[in-house]
Image (cartoon, rainbow, N blue to C red):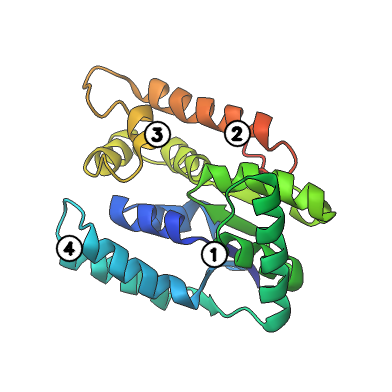
Amino acid sequence: MTNIAVDTDAIHKLIVFGLAAEANRVLLSASVRFCALNATKYVLRSKIRKSPPQKDLGLVMADLEAWFDDVEIIEPDEGEISLAAEFESIAQKLGVSLDIGESLLCSILINRSLSLILTGDKRAIVAGEKVFIEAGSVEYFQDRLICLEQVILLILSSGDPEVVRSAICAEPNVDTAISICFSCTSAEITPDSWAEGLKSYITQLEKQAPTVLYPVSF
């Protein structure tokens, strides 16, 4: 079984947008499943309650619980915690943003040979490129980090564009960049422009993290 680790930010956005099932469709298979840190569930329960979405809170919380019922829950061991602390120390030295959850997933990727890490934070991917080069471990992360914009683009290109846009624009405050891509304040923009907006963000990210960013064809 091959696993894709998902960080807190990506889970939050996919659940609130109502696109978690679509993410499953474009990323998972019989031999691939999602995994997440055990603490993530509790962090997200609190985060969603403190900043409730525009849609029904009960339905969103139910979707969150259902999502966690179908993923593998992982706990870092002492070695993984130690390596994560090393990554965080390097990030601080370099002045880049790599938080505890992301650093733990990165250390687990090395130790347990995970397939990918899906993150909703593009800064973490840019930071990872620098941190892993400095740590001498960048080869482990070649094409291993995938951003939320890439997943949304995969969903958009293989599903109903209007349904995807409606899901995004129903919660415009969840991710400002993605809401801009879908032109949530204008009804005159076409699906081609939504894809182009996402591609623009991805292309910029490729320039900043050419080694670690997962290559999604578009």
Residue 87 at x, y percent in the picture:
70, 60
User: In the drawing, what numbered circle is on residue 205?
Assistant: 2
Q: Amino acid at mark 3?
A: Ala
Q: Secondary structure at mark 1?
A: helix
Mark 2 Cα-neighbour bin, 10 Å: few <14, some 14–19, many ≥20? some
Location of residue 84 with respect to 78 vertically, above or below? above
Mark 3 Cα-neighbour bin, 10 Å: few <14, some 14–19, many ≥20? some
Disc nearer the start of the sequence (2/1): 1
- Separation of residues labelled 3 and 1 (CA atoms): 22 Å
The residue where tag 1 is placed is 101
Mark 4 Cα-neighbour bin, 10 Å: few <14, some 14–19, many ≥20? some
The residue where tag 3 is placed is 177
Residue 130 at x, y percent in the picture:
72, 44
Q: Amino acid at mark 1?
A: Gly
Residue 58 at x, y percent in the picture:
17, 68
Q: Nearer the viewer, residue 85 or 15?
A: 85
Asked if one can make out residue 2 in the rendered structure from this viewpoint, the answer is yes
Q: Nearer the viewer, residue 171 or 47?
A: 47
Disc nearer the start of the sequence (2/3): 3
The residue where tag 4 is placed is 57
Asked if one can make out residue 218 in the rendered structure from this viewpoint, the answer is no
User: In terms of image quadrants, where is residue 170?
Assistant: top left
Q: Amino acid at mark 4?
A: Leu
Quarter of the N terminus within the rendering: bottom right
Q: Secondary structure at mark 3?
A: helix
Which residue corresponds to the image point at 30% horizontal and 41% vertical from the top-left?
168
Q: Secondary structure at mark 2?
A: helix
Residue 201 at x, y percent in the picture:
51, 30
Q: Residue furthest front?
A: 93
Which residue corresponds to the image point at 54% horizontal and 42% vertical from the top-left?
122
In the figure, is residue 184 to the left or right of 71?
Answer: left
